[in-house]
């Protein structure tokens, strides 16, 4: 039924009621107006003149009709303006193009924004870490908390000589700590049983790699690495081909200190090396039986005589 068919039917019913109301003081069949008369609770005339019923007024009297294009009441299925849905709190339809609340349908064309989380990751695939772990880097540079070389941390904040022993052979290649850094002359494990040379360095520090790194970390080179009158040698990962030359190879070990002999000029600023089979260092340094592999075989069985240079 069309809009105006419905309207005509409704108005006809009202006219019939008006014609039958003999108590209407303004009644009379001759009246050209089809007044729908009624008095409210205080006697006021609230009659409706059918000729003055505009579309806007009718729209307020009746529920939405299928073709209604603008309304203030309940939306009909074909209403072009979905007043009760378009401005929603909770999505009610899948075609809603804009929402401001929680999605209730998966087909909503405007996906709600997912805010970055600030808690612990619950998905292994999360590519952004939500929390960090603070690591306190030791000022001493040595895992036992005391430095025996470059003893003034204010003057040499990025390099330290750390005394102690280790039983896992070698200093040439980078090795992970083997005893959780429980090593060093002031530790409960001064001989370094079960430890690698790296265990002598504190967390955040590592065995200095070569002459270039020592030069970068110490403004004085090897000067100040050990006090006069001591017998200390602190090894780096530097080795060489032979004859006290720094370069490729595993022949001999090189570093700083007061123990050992002077290397070739190619090793500057390093000022000490082990010589063949650590002969220039003596016990407790032990470099094995292969005179070309000292850097891969060296161990140290006690805390005396130095250890390694640690850089950060």
Image (tube, rainbow, N blue to C red):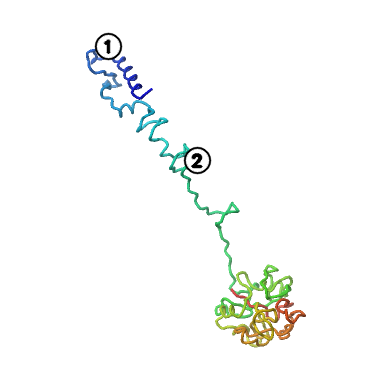
Left or right: residue 28 compared with residue 128: left
The residue under the point 67% across, 87% down is 261
| Cα–Cα span, label 1 and label 2 | 60 Å
Q: Quadrant of residue 268?
A: bottom right
Quadrant where the C terminus lies?
bottom right
Left or right: residue 96 compared with residue 148: left
Check the image and report above or below for 104 versus 283.
above
Task: Please tell me how crowded label 2 is: few (under 14), some (14-19), or many (20+) other residues with Cα within 10 Å.
Answer: few
Q: Quadrant of residue 217?
A: bottom right
Residue lying farthest to the right in this orientation: 289
Check the image and report above or below for 144 versus 252.
above
Please, what secondary structure does the residue beneath circle 1 have?
loop
The residue under the point 24% across, 18% down is 33
Q: Quadrant of residue 292?
A: bottom right
Please, what secondary structure does the residue beneath circle 2 have?
loop
Quadrant where the N terminus lies?
top left
Residue 259 lies, in percent from the top left, at: 68, 85
Check the image and report above or below for 12 versus 166.
above
- Give the mark, 1 or 2, whose residue is nearer the N terminus: 1
Q: Nearer the viewer, mark 1 or mark 2?
A: 2
Q: Which residue is mark 1?
A: 22
Front one among 153 and 278: 278
Q: Which residue is mark 2?
A: 107
Left or right: residue 29 compared with residue 224: left
Is label 1 in contact with label 2 (beta carbons under 8 Å)?
A: no
Residue 186 in view in this figure: no
Residue 2 lies, in percent from the top left, at: 36, 24
Left or right: residue 240 compared with residue 61: right
Residue 108 lies, in percent from the top left, at: 48, 41
Front one among 85 and 44: 85
């Amino acid at each position: 039924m069309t809009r105006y068919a419905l309207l005509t039917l409704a108005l006809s019913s009202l006219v019939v009621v008006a014609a039958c109301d003999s108590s209407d003081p303004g009644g009379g069949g001759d009246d050209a107006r089809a007044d729908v008369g009624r008095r409210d609770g205080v006697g006021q005339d609230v009659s409706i003149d059918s000729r003055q019923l505009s579309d806007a007024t009718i729209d307020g009297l009746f529920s939405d009709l299928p073709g209604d294009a603008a309304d203030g009441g309940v939306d009909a299925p074909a209403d072009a303006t979905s007043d009760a849905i378009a401005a929603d709190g909770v999505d009610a339809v899948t075609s809603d193009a804009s929402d401001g609340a929680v999605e209730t349908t998966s087909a909503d064309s405007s996906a709600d924004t997912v805010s970055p989380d600030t808690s612990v990751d619950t998905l292994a695939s999360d590519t952004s870490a939500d929390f960090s772990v603070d690591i306190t880097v030791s000022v001493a540079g040595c895992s036992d908390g005391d430095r025996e070389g470059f003893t003034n941390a204010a003057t040499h904040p990025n390099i330290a000589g750390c005394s102690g022993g280790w039983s896992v052979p070698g200093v040439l290649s980078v090795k992970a700590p083997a005893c959780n850094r429980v090593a060093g002359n002031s530790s409960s494990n001064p001989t370094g049983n079960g430890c690698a040379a790296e265990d002598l360095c504190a967390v955040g520090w590592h065995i200095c790699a070569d002459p270039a790194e020592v030069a970068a970390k110490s403004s004085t080179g090897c000067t100040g690495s050990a006090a006069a009158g001591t017998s200390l040698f602190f090894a780096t990962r530097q080795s060489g081909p032979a004859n006290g030359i720094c370069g490729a190879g595993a022949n001999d070990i090189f570093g700083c200190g007061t123990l050992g002999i002077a290397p070739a000029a190619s090793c500057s600023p390093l000022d000490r090396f082990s010589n063949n089979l650590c002969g220039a260092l003596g016990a407790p340094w032990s470099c094995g039986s292969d005179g070309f592999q000292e850097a891969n075989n060296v161990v140290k069985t006690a805390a005396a005589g130095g250890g390694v240079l640690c850089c950060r």
